[in-house]
Image (cartoon, grey):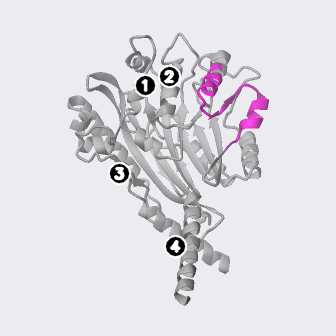
């Protein structure tokens, strides 16, 4: 009988701890952010099919598994879906299929406040919103009128028990103003302060500002970007993710040093997701991966009920404009993997040299983004599993964790707890 009772007690204890573990694990969300989804005419020509339709799915062939590993994946749609005639720079209009194929690849949300959102005027803005709605793609940044903006911005998203607030703004619209009653979210501290207050009032656990800013092709953020980022963090944003320069810029966890909070994420520019730009540094970008957790233990201290930035990594990728298996297209390829195994991506000659240059430049730039204590953000190790000829393809997506960030979190958590106990 005693043995039976012991077994029952052991079973209850195991199930209790298992349920706690599952609960803690369930309250975790992995978010992937990608850069500017462009639509130059050579991209559309490559995607056009014999029947007149468009297929951009090959673009995402090598990173689709990675994107779909996220609980939430977000990109900047930097082209209006304004209908025919389609056009590239300087005033874009892309087929709806561009957004549809990005959704199929795993992207869940698209931001629309950027300098090209008014390229086709009122018609282009409103048709883009209708097209995204018809495709079932949530979007933020541009609105039909004030009522829609007030109802939908900040965008509140709940994943695995964590309530996220997303905000989106742009520095301008290339001199083409929004036509009333349409609204484009501009960088305006009065509006942004109001939105950040609303996000907290709606119970956001984590607030993310997605912002279009900076100087095109500058590989380092300028003072204005740094000032705006600091302002956003001081007024309630937990992360700031930027775009527009079309190149990868620096990032930091320590925009406001010694503030006693967990690290604040600032990524000044993710670069391009897909484009026809081929100049040095413009032919690729990074995806940034944040994992947020609630009720986890960091450094032996349980922080139940509060969000924790549990992991931060980045994946550099290059856009291969070329032919694979006889199909000409624009392919997003993980640059580290492609440099190591270019034959499996069918990259050679001048293309290989361009890939190697992008990979070296990006790694060097981001490795220099160290904090005062020497910590840095880790790069994802990702091997795509599309083709069997890849020496490491195994049907899985192995990613390396970020032990340096975990050590930093442990340090900050202990310091914060010690300060509270003083």
Callout 2 secondary element: helix
- Please tell me in which quadrant of the rendered image residue 284 appears: top left
Q: Which mark is residue 225?
A: none
Work out whether residue 249 or residue 197 is closer to the camera in this orientation and state it: 197
Residue at mark 2 to residue at mark 1: CA–CA distance: 7 Å
Quadrant position of the C terminus in the picture: bottom right
Give the Cα distance between marks 3 and 4: 25 Å
Residue 99 image position (x, y, % from top left): 52, 27
Check if residue 147 falls in the magenta segment: yes
Query: Whole-Å distance between the Cαs marked 2 and 3?
Result: 30 Å
Task: Identify the disc placed on residue 299.
Answer: 4
Name the residue nearer the viewer: 262 or 61. Answer: 61
Q: Quadrant of the N terminus?
A: bottom right
Residue 333 vs residue 191: left or right? Answer: left
| Residue beneath the point at 28% across and 45% down | 393
Quickly name the residue at label 2.
Answer: 97
């Amino acid at each position: 009988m005693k043995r039976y009772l012991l077994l029952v007690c052991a079973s209850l204890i195991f199930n209790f701890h298992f349920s706690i573990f599952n609960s803690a694990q369930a309250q975790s969300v992995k978010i992937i952010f990608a850069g500017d989804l462009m639509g130059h005419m050579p991209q559309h020509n490559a995607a056009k099919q014999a029947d007149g339709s468009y297929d951009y799915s090959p673009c995402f062939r090598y990173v689709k598994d990675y994107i779909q590993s996220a609980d939430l994946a977000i990109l900047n749609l930097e082209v209006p879906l304004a209908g025919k005639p389609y056009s590239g720079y300087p005033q874009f209009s892309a087929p709806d299929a561009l957004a549809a194929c990005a959704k199929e690849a795993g992207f869940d949300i698209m931001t629309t406040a950027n300098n090209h959102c008014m390229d086709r005027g009122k018609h282009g803005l409103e048709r883009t919103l209708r097209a995204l709605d018809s495709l079932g793609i949530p979007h933020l940044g541009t609105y039909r009128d004030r009522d829609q903006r007030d109802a939908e911005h900040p965008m509140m998203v709940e994943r695995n028990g964590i309530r996220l607030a997303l905000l989106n703004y742009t520095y301008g619209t290339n001199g083409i103003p929004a036509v009333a009653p349409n609204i484009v979210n501009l960088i305006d501290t009065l509006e942004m302060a109001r939105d950040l207050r609303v996000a907290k009032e709606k119970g956001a656990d984590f607030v993310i500002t997605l912002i279009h800013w900076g100087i095109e092709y500058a590989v380092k953020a300028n003072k204005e970007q740094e000032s705006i980022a600091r302002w956003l963090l001081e007024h309630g944003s937990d992360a700031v993710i930027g775009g527009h320069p079309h190149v990868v810029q620096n990032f930091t966890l320590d925009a406001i040093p010694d503030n006693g909070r967990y690290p604040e994420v600032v990524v000044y520019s993710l670069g391009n997701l897909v484009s026809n730009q081929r100049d040095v540094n413009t032919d690729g970008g990074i995806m940034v991966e944040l994992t947020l957790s609630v009720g986890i233990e960091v450094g032996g201290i349980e922080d139940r009920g509060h969000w924790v930035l549990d992991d931060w990594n980045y994946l550099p990728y290059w856009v291969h404009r070329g032919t694979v298996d006889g199909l000409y297209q624009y392919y997003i390829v993980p640059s580290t993997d492609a440099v190591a195994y270019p034959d499996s991506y069918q990259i050679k000659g001048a293309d290989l040299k361009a890939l190697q240059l992008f990979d070296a430049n990006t790694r060097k730039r981001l490795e220099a983004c160290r904090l005062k204590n020497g910590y840095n953000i880790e790069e994802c190790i990702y091997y795509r599993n599309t083709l069997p000829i890849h020496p490491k393809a195994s049907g899985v997506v192995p990613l390396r964790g970020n032990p340096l960030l975990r050590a930093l979190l442990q340090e900050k958590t202990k310091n914060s707890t010690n300060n509270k106990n003083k």
